[in-house]
Image (cartoon, rainbow, N blue to C red):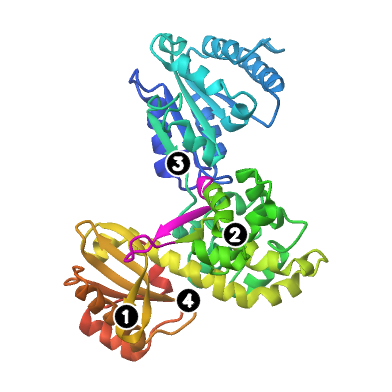
Amino acid sequence: MLAKPDNVFDRTAEWGALARFAGSPAASARFGVVSGRRRQGKTFLLDALARATGGFYFAATEDTELESLRRFGRALAARTGSGGEFQLHNWEDALRQLYAVVPDGLIIIDELPYLLAASPALASQLQQVLDPGGLARDTTSKLLVCGSAMAVMGGLLSGNAPLRGRASLELVVPPMDYRTAAEFWGVLDQPELAVLLHSVVGGTPAYRHEFVHSDAPADLADFGDWVIRTVLNPSVPLFREARYLLAEETGARDTPLYHGVLGAIALGHNTRGGIASYLERPSTNISHPLTVLEDCGLVSKEPDAFRTGRSTYRIAEPLVTFYSAVMRRNWSFLERGMAEQAWQAGQETFRSQVAGPHFEQLCREYALRNAVALFGGPPSTVAAGTVADPAARSQIQVDVAVLGTEGQVLSLGEAKWKQTMGLPHLDRLRRARDLLAAKGHRTAGTRLACYSGAGFTPDLLSAAETENVLLVDLPALYAQP
């Protein structure tokens, strides 16, 4: 298998999948699809793969069909070394020429959605090429297509789509996990800083160098200054990135409504009714933007672990959360170049509505990745959940609920970002466990867990030893798995 180039950080699984596809001797390995949100390094990976294999690489742009064909013709001519360009009249002609020029080896077409926008019939033409009797069957070439428009790429192989059933590779390139991102930014040994940084830029690799001029916070004391000089600085590309993401991913025409929906979710109004109430609109008015935001991967809908039919919405891209909760609400400062004032005004919101909920999400990711070792079995669900307490006429919020594959409640956990956790937190988890047991849930082996960014009281530390309570602090969160 092809060795991963030294300049490709991490992405071992993704490179392995691409290398196996490119080197597969199987005749059925003719077509693969690569997708993922923007800025995740897909193009970097595919360019490295093309270089390693000597493959043909073409990156589409937003052009008319005529201009795209001209650019494609020039790329084919460059491949042959003849110079000039091939005269291509349509995409059927282009595909014939493509397989004639590249009868074996790897073909990569990046940003396919741009081509499909100008030439909707291209998907059907690709199907004809790949089907029995198609010209691809007379070659040993392998075709990889890639795109960042998640709604388009998601529909490429679904339902009655022309290419459904044709792909032998379907690879989604995700953001880096939080620990890998901390290593990439050089802050793995500073876990509090790593959480704060991840709550702003997430695991998107492009934000490390290109978007901030390779500027990373030196330490925790530098974090606020780093935010001011990069994220809140109009001369730095990261400043406008969140707005560009929304425009690129959704093609939203009613931009204020989309921003309003994201702003409501970022501020904790994360149910359909809560979003509608915050925006003072009927819930029917927000159905379409929510669906679009889900389809393009900017928002995820997460079911409650214990209440069937109840779900909450979460923004999947941390930078969009930061923009919606902090930047947009202090835009009057930012548009006047007053970044320090904007950060000062937004810090409390950042702590409570950005960093706190993000820490809870990292704890759920930690529980998911370590469930077998920590809780004794594979998880079917790791999510937040609410447990009704009729006697107290209240609800207990469980931040990290780990459910097993056979209906067991493997773990119930509470997460606090900047609060030292003590016995009251453990008592609340005990009460939740008892209430779930009374409702018929299997809680005999349930392990209670406390996740804290500020540590634990001596009483809780003592109780944890007696009751086998899991305590996870920041060093444990970022420890080597």
Q: Is residue 300 magenta?
A: yes
| First along the sequence among labels 3 and 1 | 3
Q: CA distance from mark 2 to mark 1?
A: 31 Å
Q: Secondary structure at mark 2?
A: helix
Residue 34 screen position, x and y as percent: 48, 35
Residue 1 screen position, x and y as percent: 37, 31
| First along the sequence among labels 3 and 2 | 3
Q: Is residue 384 left or right of residue 317?
A: left
Can the viewer see residue 3?
A: no
How would you rate the neighbour count of disc 1 (Cα within 10 Å): few for under 14, some for 14-19, many for 20 or more?
some
The numbered mark at residue 389 is 1
| First along the sequence among labels 1 and 4 | 1
Can the viewer see residue 275?
A: yes
- Relative to residue 363, is residue 249 depicted above or below? above
Could you say which quadrant of the image residue 160 lies in? top left
* Residue that label 2 marks: 262
* Residue that label 3 marks: 172
Q: CA distance from mark 3 to mark 1?
A: 41 Å
Q: Secondary structure at mark 1?
A: strand
Q: Nearer the viewer, mark 2 or mark 1?
A: 1
- Relative to residue 314, is residue 192 depicted above or below? below
Residue 480 screen position, x and y as percent: 37, 62
Range of magenta residues: 294-311
* Residue that label 4 marks: 417
Q: CA distance from mark 1 to mark 4?
A: 24 Å
The kind of residue on which mark 4 rests is Trp
Q: CA distance from mark 4 to mark 2?
A: 23 Å
Q: Nearer the viewer, residue 456 or 122?
A: 122
Q: Are marks 1 and 4 in contact (CB under 8 Å)?
A: no
Q: Is residue 4 magenta?
A: no
The kind of residue on which mark 1 rests is Asp
